[in-house]
Amino acid sequence: MRNYHFPGRSVVQAINGVAATSNPLSTLAAIDVLRQGGNAIDASVAACAVQCVVEPMSTGIGGDCFVLYQKGGTGPVIGINGSGWSPAGLTLEHLEESDVSVIGTESIESVTIPGAIDAWCAIMESYGALGIDTVLQPAIRLAEDGFAISEVTQQQWSRRVDGLRGNAAASTLYLKAGDAPATGDVWRSPALGQTLRVVAKKGRDGFYAGPVLDQMLADLQAAGGMHTADDFTDYCYETVTPIASGYRGRTVLEIPPSGQGITAQIMLNILEDFDLTGLDPCSAERFHLMVEAQRLAFVERDKFVADQRATDVPIDFLLSEDLATTLRSHIREDQAIDHLPIVDGPKHEDTVYLTVVDRDLNCVSFINSLFWGFGSCIASEKTGVVFQNRGSGFVMERGHPNCVGPRKRPLHTIIPGMVLDGDGKCELSFGVMGGHYQPVGHGQVITNLWDHGLDIQQAIDCPRVFHNGAAIEAEDSVPAETLVRLEALGHAIEPAPHPHGGSQGIVIDRVRGVLAAGSDPRKDGCALGY
């Protein structure tokens, strides 16, 4: 039970609808759409569009989108993979001939085709109650009329000033006198607002064809990109079947590869054979098991997770009890695993995750990202679009499943989550931002709920750790005695440079007919219901 003598947040309880996002303006937009007759899909797209305006370092229409959706809180869950592909001309041979040995995070080679708008328009057409023109209006108003910059947003914005300064268009769009705006400054993005107006009027064709596309292509090609009109117009999201695994009598759903959600499922498969219920959620013993499961799962991720359209990802093997048993056998409760391959990949924590459940129990788990803060920092000034750098997730190793290739999706870190009860009905819609941390966050939230008995807000608030391949990065809130004990178990400890990610979650209490929502204090946002 929460100790009310200490700072904290109450779980938001609602009966008609609830939304949780990382920005209050986004949450408010979702609730406004629900109250005017929209459903959870409408509210999610409206909220995400707002975040593309008010959290431009974390997400944007130049990025990607993944969605899990269950209509009416029962029946099949629909997965949407709205992640973009690389240009048709981007081959390993071309990069080798150009003496490119690594796809840099601010390089033109890192810019994949944005998939978000295509996915938004598709789910609105298939499942929304309102039109795309209606749900984009809150974002358009904020882009054109302005908004006050919030605290965490300002901090994350300021961390990418150097990258923005390196691109004239990005600097013009997102710097104020060459620096990041201050907390409380009023910010406007009129070029982005105008592009959103075109999408509101024309739908998908407002972005993937016509003047907006022409301008984006001109800017990409001027920067040396191989992007063509066909790369945009041919692009199409995928409807996918979520991959499922069990945990404590429930079903954990994730988007299949190219997403890394399967990593969370491998972790949970390893952990299910351990009795966590008697452990303090902030104890060294609990964090040790989480970290060891993470390290083992990440080795499998880095070997196998890639674009299934281009390679065979052995999903059945990765989710098998045989693999879980083999991996689990490497864990000792009294000593850290030695000589494990380190996790190699760019660090980042810039994504937005949101979730909405409406009065009809339509459940949406929704995530949208530019990868790094402000993505590649390559921008199109007249359209207001900043392009993602998701292509830096490729490897340049011939024969590797995740090797760079034409019209290929790189390993993707953003992963919406959903947990079904024993009857196949959504019990939890949730997600955790934070790049490579995300599957670890999924595992920590789920075990907080169903091993340690925390409520959704407590499960989100709980201190976090992440193994970066060399050491455990521990948040400041992890107890000192826990860190001492982890070191005694053989773990190197480092302070986390920033809090690990940010999370939103909604638990559906079907017995009482109540929606319970939590929102991460590591971000600016909140949960609201009515």
Image: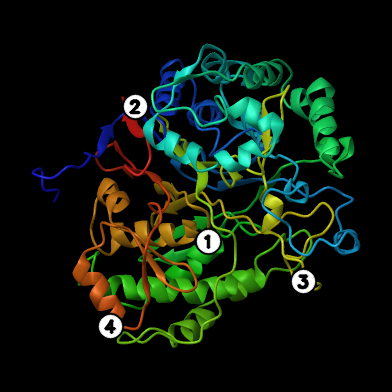
Q: Amino acid at mark 3?
A: Glu
For label 3, the SS is loop
Q: Amino acid at mark 4?
A: Ala
**How far separated are the C-alphas under marks 1 and 4?**
36 Å
| Residue at 85% over, 60% down | 95
Comparing marks 2 and 3, which lies closer to the viewer?
Answer: 3
The image shows residue 434 at horizontal and vertical percentages of: 48, 52
Comparing marks 3 and 1, which lies closer to the viewer?
Answer: 3
Does label 4 or label 3 sit earlier along the sequence? 3
Q: Which residue is mark 2?
A: 16
Q: Amino acid at mark 1?
A: Ala
Foreground pick, 2 / 391? 391
Which mark is on residue 10? none
Q: Is residue 447 left or right of residue 130?
A: left
The image shows residue 224 at horizontal and vertical percentages of: 85, 43
Question: Do callouts 1 and 2 mark residues in contact (Cβ within 8 Å)?
Answer: no
Which mark is on residue 488? 4
- Crowd around label 4: few <14 · some 14–19 · many ≥20 (10 Å): some
Comparing marks 1 and 4, which lies closer to the viewer?
Answer: 4
**How far separated are the C-alphas under marks 3 and 1?**
30 Å
Which mark is on residue 244? 1
Q: Which residue is mark 3?
A: 397
